[in-house]
Amino acid sequence: MYDKHITHYQTAAFYTLGCKLNFAETSTIGKELAAHGIRKAGAGEEADICVINTCSVTEWADKKSRQLIRRTRTRHPNALIIVTGCYAQLQPESVQQIEGVGLVLGHAQKSGIINHLNNFVSPQITISPADEIEAFFPSCSASDRTRHFLKVQDGCDYHCTYCTVPLARGRSRNGSIADLVDQAEKVAEEGGKEIVLTGVNTGDFGKNTQESFLDLLHALDQVKGIARYRISSIEPNLITNEIIEFVASGTRFAPHFHIPLQSGSDNILRLMHRRYDTTLFRHKIEKIKTLLPNAFIGVDVIVGTRGETDEFYETGFQFIQSLPISQLHVFTYSERPNTQALNIYPVVSPKIKQQRSKLLLKLSDRKWLEFYESQIGKAEQVLFEHSRKGKNMVGFTANYIKTEAFYNPAMINRMTDVRLTGWNTEKNALTASFIN
């Protein structure tokens, strides 16, 4: 039984699983608590409040969420445990049954967490149905990293057969361009140099404000002090030629794209209810590479979905292999409750899923190595981060090459001209020399 008033809480700990959107939202919750005098707990310090922002994109994500809740209770035995995020939204009763959970909040309740604390007297669930969520919860992360993650959109009106995100996040909605520009200006005032635009379906921006994603890019491009923007995952049918051309025409939007393919088989794409085919996808990739030959292109792929026959898998593999992309993000299909995919047959066995996943991961490794090799010798600008690795500091080029150089505190959070000279010891990043 909890009976604390808000004034009795002094410290908070934060734990986040899943997408960058979750990290941005956790950061905003932290800011709200800090504004009411609740500071972030230090390392090893027992917190009064623990906020756990969960994920539910796969069965494994559900399991990790449950494990994190239990570990948090062990580390902070006297804390009020608050669980939010997609797992909390989709399975609130299951979350509440985990020992030690005090408050379960849905996505709509992330905003105004202080009100929930003030009114909280016993373990409870406060969840608004996803299809009733209309408000946009503005968020921007402000972690120790040089990069900031700005939430520009939330929810999804697509209904892919394998996905529970619309059930968890609700309808597509977004902030206004004016509000988002204001947040970007605040990042610049705080010394932030790079902003990553995040959302559930980022390219769908503007539905409820009668604006467009391209309009947003133009407006953000005018914000002084931000050296670089990145566009996070954007659907193939929503990354227009105009967006690609805009990125190619300037210097502030990075030549770095993350585009979900999900399958290289048109048959599987139809079963998934995706809104494009492989012809359109190839066109987008080739358009990017024509205008931005050094662009980094990451691609999401789901392997082992229901209906993925040997023939469909092989067709998809050959298509992906033929694309001039830089890396694959491979996800093994996980059955989700209340999805249309459960009505699709045949079912792929776990063993075959594992085999197919390994092959795609090997393909990804080859493409990643080839891309990095192609960049050795090039002059680039790197934004070095606060984190360091032994005697080296780490940063990223505009086209997302992880880069190491000898630690120099004067170079942290500055756009620095370097030449990429070769592989580091672990061969997971390129080394760099400074260009005077």
Image (tube, rainbow, N blue to C red):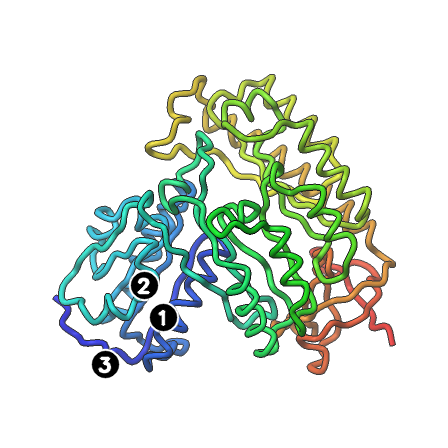
Is the residue 313 above or below the residue 22 in the image?
A: above
Q: CA distance from mark 1 to mark 2?
A: 9 Å
Q: Which mark is residue 231?
A: none
Tell me which amino acid carries mark 3: Thr
The residue to which callout 3 is attached is: 7
Q: Residue at x 43, y 35 (%)?
A: 334
The 10 Å Cα crowd at callout 1, few under 14, some 14 to 19, many 20 or more, is many
Q: Locate residue 382, reporting x and y percent.
A: 74, 67
Q: Is 282 placed left or right of 15 in the picture?
A: right
Q: Nearer the viewer, mark 3 or mark 1?
A: 3
Residue drawn at the location 69% of the way across and 48% of the way down = 243
Q: Amino acid at mark 2?
A: Thr
- Nearest the viewer among 48 and 75 is 48
Q: Find disc 1 in the rendering and name its residue.
A: 13
Q: Amino acid at mark 1?
A: Ala
Find residue 323 and report its horizontal and vertical position in percent.
Answer: 73, 34
The residue at the point 44 percent across, 67 percent down is: 27
User: Mark 3, residues whose alpha carbon is within 10 Å: few (<14), some, or many (≥20)?
Assistant: few
| Residue under pointer 2 | 72
